Structure formats: C-alpha cells, structure tokens
C-alpha cells in the first residue's frame, strides 16, 4: 500500500535520472517513488519541471500548504483514468435537481451519523455530562429528520450548519476549558480547537482529492457544495463524511492524552496557529490513523481508513452508474 | 480509433471476398461496441467486469495481480516482436513460419476457457481477413504452451459471443455477483465495497 509523504522543512526536490531527492542544508533524502501515494508539502518547496513531470507520470499529486498550514493548492497529475461515460453520468446527477438533492443529503446523513457516533463514544464514561450530551444527540437527530423535507440544497446546507453548531456545542461540554471551540472560526482560527480543526480538515480534503485522482470521478462535479465554490469541490463533499471519523477522533486523542503543550501553538488567542512541533505531532497521528485498519464486513478483509475513502468513491461511482444506491459510511466500530 | 486511410485499404481488401465476410469488419470495429480480445476474455470471466472495462472504468495501478501480468508481459519473450496490432486488435506477439502463430501470454491456466476464447476470437477475425493462423497460449510461469486451432463450431460460438457482448455493454451495469474468482479480481473492492454498510445508526 502506498503512503503519504510529509515534508515540513524548506528545501528542494531534485530529480536525478529516476530518483527524486529532497535536499536542504541539513542533508539529502531519497523519496521512495514506488511507495508514495501523495506528497504533502508544508515548507517552502522548490522543484524543477523534471521532478514535476516525473511525479506526474507516476501519478503522485503534491499538496501545498502555506506557512500557516492552510491548503493552498495541488499539483494534480494529468488524468489517466478517464471514463467519459462516468463523467456524463456524474454531471447528470448534478443537473437533475432531485438526483442532486438525494446525493447532497447522503453526505450530510453520513457526516451526521459519524458525529453522533463520536458524541456517544466520548460521553460513554462521563456520568457528569451524559444527560446534556443526550439532549444534544436528540436535537441533532431532530435536525437530521428535517433533511427529508428539504427542497433545495441551500436549505440542506442550513440544516447541516445547525447540526455542526450543535455538535460543537456538545464537544465544548466534553473538552476541558482550554480546548473549547465556543464559535467555529476559520481564517484565522481564533483558538486552539479551531486551529486543530482547520489544520485537520485541510488534510482530509487533500487526502480525499488524491483518492479521487485514482478513480474515474471528476473532482470538480459535486453535489452538496457548488462546483463553482472551489476547484475540487467533490473533495469537499466526500470529506464531510471523514472529518468526524479521522480528524475529530485525532483531536480527542491529542487532548485526552495531553499530547499537546503550549509549544505546539504559536500566535495568540484570536489568531492561533500550529507551530512546527504541533504540526509534526498532528501529522504523525494523522498518518497513523490513515494506516489503521478495521475489518470490513462486506469485503471480509481488513481495510485501512485511507482505503475507506477510496471505497466511498467507488460507491459513489456505482450510484451514478445506476448500479447500486449510495449509502454513506457510518462507523460500525 | 481508426483513421480514414486504414479504412479505405481494408475496404479494397474486402471487395475480393464474399458478402458475409465483409460484415465482420463492421461488426468488430464500426459497431457501437468495439469488440476486442480482452472483451471476449472478460465475457467468459464476468459480465460485470466486461461492462466496467468497456465503459473505461479501469482500476488504478497497484493491484498485485495486474502488476505481475504487466511484468511478465514486458520481461519474457524479449526477442519476439511484441504487441502487434492488426486492425486495432492487439496481439501479444506473432511468429511467422510455415503457418503464422498468434501468441498470447498468460499467467496461469485458471481462466483457461476465457483465454482460449480470446485467442479463438483473434483467429476468427484473421480468418475473415484472409489469414490462416494458429494460436498458441504461452504460460511462462508453468513452462507450458498450448496450441489452439479453430473449428466450425468455434466460429459459430464467436459470432454468438460478439452479439452477446454488444448487448451487455449497451445495457446498464450488471449487478456484481459474488463468485470464487472475485477474490483475485482487481474489481473486487469496486464491486463489493457497499456491502455491510448500514444507514445511519
């Protein structure tokens, strides 16, 4: 199984024949090209067109993040898996309002299912807050039940927004004071929790994009998010399902096990960012999470969390091909 | 994709022959579904695989079996000319001699019927184009070869198969059915990833 490669330092990617090196004043490292699925670049990365064409030929995307850890863009290799047929059907499901609404709802449904799993999991041994969390769970379910009556995607988005707000309020009950979200803020995130969520979400977005690259799905045709919203909006749609599964669980672990100290953050309240140390800790956890395997009942074998993203895309492909209705992944473990 | 010039020369060749024999060209290349050896092969293995492959739903590099097949293909028989393309039909390699030999390289004998059908399709097509050839299946990992000749019954079968393949490809995706061979198929995850999911909680 190919793995992600994370570069936190500044440096240069060099190609010498068919070997790619990462070089800086601290030394030189060979990139095992046959073992990499994508490169995540957090530092200032320079590279030649030779490297780009080689990585492109090998089908390896590079995702770029800026100084603050925000997603900036990707070197998305030339598409090799192309099915005109599938793209047309993907577009058909966008253009037909009923079909689009159905798919948009599925992404929210999946995200919500995983959100509820998280809440139940983390409130399980907390008698002090059990009742409060139960109330939140009930409210979230009530919101979710309104989804069926939604007639437009924007009204679905509003429902989703409300669910997230309830979720974050519920999380504030679980997390220690230092890590309260209070209000979700993005650019810039204003406190520790918002910083962690932002950093993680952009990782999920890029990972999903890499997986889309390995399917025939077109990354720009999406259902919940508008295709004009961002370049690869299908990645945003599918990420919704995986954010609670991957990122929220990582954050729970980091906080519960006290793995972060003040040195992991920089900036101040109101404009908080992860330091290099913080990024390193988070990325390590993220990478381990992606490699963790669980037993898949349908396939009767173990699959990694990363593979689950691919499977989700296969399910989506089958849905637009009319072979099998899409059911979003909800953690069964 | 065929370009015009090729079509013209083929057409003049076909003029020398009887009416029914000009049809195979149209059947195989100009019909709404282009028939290839691989499609004939998949027809015998799995209808879902045939459909997915025909609709360009291929899978990413990384499947071990696929990789092994590719290496076998590239590594063995280096001396022989490889990937001969005749009218867009791609043949692993061809040996000329008293009788032309059409060679196909295979990893194992597991898909025997399908591999034979694939070769028979090549032989059938070449016969219609006026070539007399014999097929050889090569199993480099088993150190074996097998000779295949076509009889009248085979010919009738292939004609029927071509019709069937067209029908399958033009209808909607056949629902995956779990078989023993699925375990080794590159499409396994694609086909069965939705099983075991439940809705909500």
Image: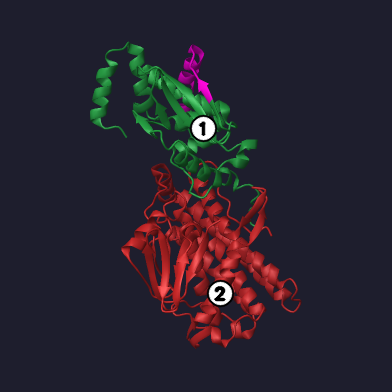
Chain colours: A red, B green
Nearer the observer, B15 or B103: B103
User: Where does residue A92 sit, x and y in percent of width and height?
Assistant: 41, 46
Magenta residues, dominant SS class: helix
The numbered disc on residue A331 is none
Circle 2: element type:
helix
Question: Taking the image as drawn, is residue B81 in sight?
Answer: yes
As drawn, is A107 to the left or to the right of A59? Answer: right
User: Where does residue B36 sit, x and y in percent of width and height?
Assistant: 42, 30
In the rendered structure, the residue with mark 1 lies on which chain?
B
Q: Mark 2 points at which residue?
A: A282
Asked if residue B149 is among those painted magenta in the image, a careful observer would answer yes
Nearer the observer, A22 or B56: A22
| The magenta segment | B146-167
Q: Name the residue under label 1.
A: B42
Nearer the observer, B173 or A33: A33
Q: Looking at the rendering, in which quadrant would you find the N terminus of chain A?
A: bottom right
């Amino acid at each position: 199984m190919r793995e992600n490669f994370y570069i936190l330092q500044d440096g240069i990617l060099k190609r010498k024949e068919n070997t790619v090196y990462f070089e800086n004043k601290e030394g030189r490292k060979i990139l095992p090209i046959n073992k990499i699925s994508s490169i995540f670049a957090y530092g200032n990365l320079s590279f030649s067109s030779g490297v780009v064409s080689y990585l492109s030929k090998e089908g390896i995307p590079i995702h770029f993040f800026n100084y603050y850890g925000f997603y900036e863009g990707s070197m998305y290799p030339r598409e090799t898996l192309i099915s005109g047929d599938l793209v047309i059907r993907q577009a058909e499901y966008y253009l037909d309002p009923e079909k689009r609404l159905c798919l948009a709802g599925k992404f929210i449904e999946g995200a919500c299912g995983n959100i509820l799993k998280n809440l139940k999991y983390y409130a399980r041994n907390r008698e002090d807050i059990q009742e409060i969390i139960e109330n939140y769970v009930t409210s979230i379910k009530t919101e979710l039940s309104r989804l069926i009556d939604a007639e437009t995607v924007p009204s679905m988005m509003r429902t989703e927004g409300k669910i997230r707000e309830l979720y974050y309020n519920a999380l504030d009950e679980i997390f220690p004071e230092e890590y309260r979200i209070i209000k979700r803020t993005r650019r810039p995130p204003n406190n520790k929790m918002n910083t962690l969520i932002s950093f993680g979400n952009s990782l999920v977005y890029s990972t999903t994009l890499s997986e889309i690259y390995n399917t025939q799905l077109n990354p720009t045709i999406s259902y919940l998010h508008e295709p004009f919203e961002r370049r690869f909006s299908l990645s945003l749609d599918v990420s919704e399902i995986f954010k609670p599964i991957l990122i929220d669980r990582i954050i729970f672990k980091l906080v519960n096990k006290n793995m972060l100290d003040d040195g992991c953050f920089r900036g101040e309240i109101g404009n908080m960012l992860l330091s290099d140390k913080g990024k390193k800790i988070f990325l390590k956890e993220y990478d381990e999470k992606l490699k963790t395997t669980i037993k898949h009942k349908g396939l009767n074998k173990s699959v990694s969390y990363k593979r689950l993203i691919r499977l989700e895309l296969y399910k989506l492909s089958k849905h637009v091909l009319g072979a099998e209705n899409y059911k979003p992944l909800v953690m069964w473990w | 994709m065929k370009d015009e010039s090729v079509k013209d020369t083929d057409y003049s060749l076909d003029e020398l022959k009887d009416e029914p024999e000009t049809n195979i060209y149209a059947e195989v290349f100009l019909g709404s579904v282009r028939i290839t050896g691989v499609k004939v092969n998949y027809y015998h293995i799995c209808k879902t695989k045939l459909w997915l492959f025909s609709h360009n739903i291929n899978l990413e590099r990384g499947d071990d079996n696929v990789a092994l097949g590719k290496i076998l293909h590239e590594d063995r028989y280096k001396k022989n000319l490889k990937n001969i393309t005749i009218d867009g039909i791609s043949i692993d390699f061809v040996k000329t001699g008293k009788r032309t030999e059409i060679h196909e390289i295979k990893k194992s004998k597991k898909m025997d019927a399908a591999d034979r059908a694939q070769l028979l399709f090549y032989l059938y097509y070449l016969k219609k184009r006026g070539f007399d050839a014999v097929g050889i299946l090569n199993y480099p990992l088993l150190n074996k070869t097998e000779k295949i000749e076509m009889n009248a019954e085979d010919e009738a079968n292939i004609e029927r198969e071509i019709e069937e393949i067209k029908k399958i490809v033009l209808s909607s995706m056949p629902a995956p059915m779990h078989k023993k061979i699925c375990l080794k198929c590159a499409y396994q995850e694609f086909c069965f990833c939705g099983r075991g999911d439940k809705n909500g909680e």
